[in-house]
Image: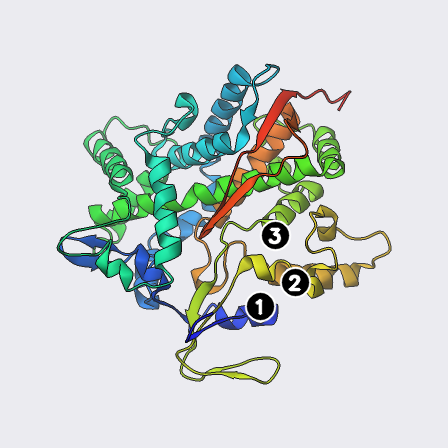
């Protein structure tokens, strides 16, 4: 891919390059996500190339992102799902209006992150539009990131220029929003309802538990990671799930049948849907077909070099990595139909014995790079899984969806995250008896 840059595709190398030991360090690709503050370059838990830095600042918050920690926030997610359904019904359900569901899934994803982080949505669903250009700024920043990461030194001329900053768009509005919410919480601690703690409550508690690591600036850093990294990727996944289901009516019919038989509470609880096999298969297949990240996740070969399975040797210091979009289409792992949306591949075949199925399933899971892998795996994967399971089960239990034009394809743009636009649909109420 470049003078010192090799793209690898063999899934057998995932556990080597993206190991839990972290001996393949991140490249300067990620330095573009550093921040220039008071003339100093400040790293964060995503951008840092240092395992020691990453471990130090992750230690206080790691348990908050375990599945048990995430499920403690489920009532807050339910609040946003209810608002989402209300707004769809007010504007689109059983009405002649068509809905660009991609936009509304983005509003939902940002608002649910706001709810679990601050106990209040940011307000995108209620407004039905961008607020303070937060969404458009995030997209422009991704566009900048995708290009400049290919030549990271340009970032010191543009974003990190100490004399005059030339770009990209600033996250000032998002940072200001986080700082304002934090100061309000500190000032009104006595009147705040602590019966349902949110992320901000937990982050402020970490200031007391880890005073040598967590201060107000670090709290804002944690909040920004939640807001900026936790919404777009979830929206991308939700768009993929709905789009592929609408493009594959037989798969959608199977999902409706499973959800109807489950008699779920609404909003659907995570406990009630986590073991629904076809829902799980749909989510896995949509994430396989359309992973949120569409560029190579770069790492640096350590001092011992890298021996490839075919006998070739990659020298120390070489930048290597894998692109989820390439690995997820590997026909040896996922079958000859790897380019087709087929949730059944995640289920046991009629003529397949249990041992063969388990081995095949393990190979596919081992090749899954949806959330990355190793010691730098996506921090918010459990939050994303909870959100997607709950909202998909709720939406397809309440509504019927149909594309405005079944022949029309969506538009996609790869700017690190592979964003989709133009998914226009019609929505009607779902009736189990006639579905």
Q: Please state, as top left, top right, bottom left or bottom right, where the C terminus lies in the image.
A: top right
Q: Distance of mark 1 from mark 3, alpha carbons?
A: 15 Å
Q: Where is residue 223 in the image (x, y as percent from the top left)?
A: 32, 43
Instruction: Please give the residue where the numbered disc 2 appears in the rendered image.
Output: 330
Task: Determine crowd level at label 2: few under 14, some 14-19, many 20+ residues with C-alpha closer than 10 A.
Answer: some
Percent coordinates x, y for residue 352 in the rendering? 83, 57
- Alpha carbons under labels 2 and 3: distance apart: 11 Å
Numbered circle sitting on residue 9 = 1
The residue lying toward the viewer, choosing from 368 and 240, is 240
Marked residue nearer the N-terminal end (2 or 3): 3
In this rendering, would 435 be left or right of 154?
A: right
Identify the mark at residue 288; answer none if there is no mark: 3
Name above or below for residue 21 compared with residue 117: below
Q: What residue is at 41 percent from the left and 37 percent from the top? A: 113
Number of residues whose C-alpha sits closer than 10 Å to that of mark 3, classed few (under 14), some (14–19) or many (20 or more): many
Q: Name the residue located 41 percent from the left edge and 75 percent from the top edge.
A: 3
Residue at x 57% of width, y 57% of height = 325
Query: Is residue 339 left or right of 154 when viewed as pictured?
Result: right
Give the percent coordinates (x, y) of residue 303. Answer: 40, 83
363 sits left or right of 167 in the view: right
Q: Do the residues labelled 1 and 2 touch (CB within 8 Å)?
A: yes
Number of the label disc, if any, that sits on residue 242? none
Q: Distance between the residues labelled 1 and 2?
A: 8 Å
Q: Is mark 3 on a helix, strand or loop?
A: helix
Category of crowding for the residue at label 1, using alpha-carbon neighbours closer than 10 angstroms: few (below 14), some (14–19), many (at least 20): some
């Amino acid at each position: 891919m470049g003078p010192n840059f090799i793209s690898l595709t063999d899934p057998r190398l995932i556990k080597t390059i993206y190991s839990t030991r972290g001996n393949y360090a991140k490249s300067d690709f990620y330095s573009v996500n550093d921040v220039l503050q008071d003339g100093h370059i400040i790293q964060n838990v995503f951008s840092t190339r240092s395992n020691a830095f990453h471990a130090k600042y992750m230690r206080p918050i790691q348990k908050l992102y375990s599945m048990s920690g995430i499920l403690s926030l489920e009532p807050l997610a339910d609040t946003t799902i209810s608002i989402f359904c209300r707004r769809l019904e007010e504007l689109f359900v059983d009405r002649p209006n068509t809905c660009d569901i991609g936009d509304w899934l983005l509003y939902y994803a940002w608002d649910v992150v706001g709810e679990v982080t601050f106990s209040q949505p940011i307000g995108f669903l209620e407004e039905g539009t961008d607020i303070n250009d937060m969404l458009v700024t995030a997209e422009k920043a991704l566009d900048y990131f995708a290009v400049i990461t290919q030549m990271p030194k340009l970032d010191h001329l543009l974003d990190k220029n100490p004399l005059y900053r030339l770009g990209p768009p600033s996250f000032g509005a998002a940072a200001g929003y986080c700082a304002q919410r934090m100061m309000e919480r500190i000032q009104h601690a006595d009147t705040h309802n602590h019966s349902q703690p949110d992320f901000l409550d937990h982050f402020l508690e970490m200031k007391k538990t880890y005073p040598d690591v967590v201060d107000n600036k670090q709290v804002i850093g944690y909040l920004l990671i939640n807001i900026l990294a936790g919404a777009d990727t979830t929206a991308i996944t939700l768009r993929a799930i709905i789009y592929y289901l609408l493009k594959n009516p037989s798969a959608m019919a199977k999902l409706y049948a499973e959800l109807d038989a489950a008699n779920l509470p609404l909003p659907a609880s995570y406990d009630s849907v986590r073991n629904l096999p076809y829902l799980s298969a749909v989510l896995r297949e949509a994430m396989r077909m359309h992973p949120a990240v569409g560029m190579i996740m770069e790492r640096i070969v350590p001092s011992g070099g890298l021996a490839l399975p075919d006998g070739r040797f990659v020298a120390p210091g070489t930048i290597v990595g894998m692109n989820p979009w390439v690995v997820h289409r590997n026909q040896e792992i996922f079958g000859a139909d790897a380019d087709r949306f087929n949730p059944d591949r995640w289920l046991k075949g009629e003529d397949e014995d249990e041992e063969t199925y388990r081995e095949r399933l393990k190979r596919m899971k081992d090749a899954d790079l949806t959330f990355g892998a190793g010691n730098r795996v996506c921090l918010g994967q459990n939050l994303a899984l909870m959100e997607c399971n709950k909202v998909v089960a709720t939406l397809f239990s309440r509504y019927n969806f149909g594309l405005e034009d079944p022949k029309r394809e969506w538009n996609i743009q790869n700017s690190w995250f592979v964003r989709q636009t133009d998914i226009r649909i019609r929505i009607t109420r779902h009736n189990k008896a006639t579905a």
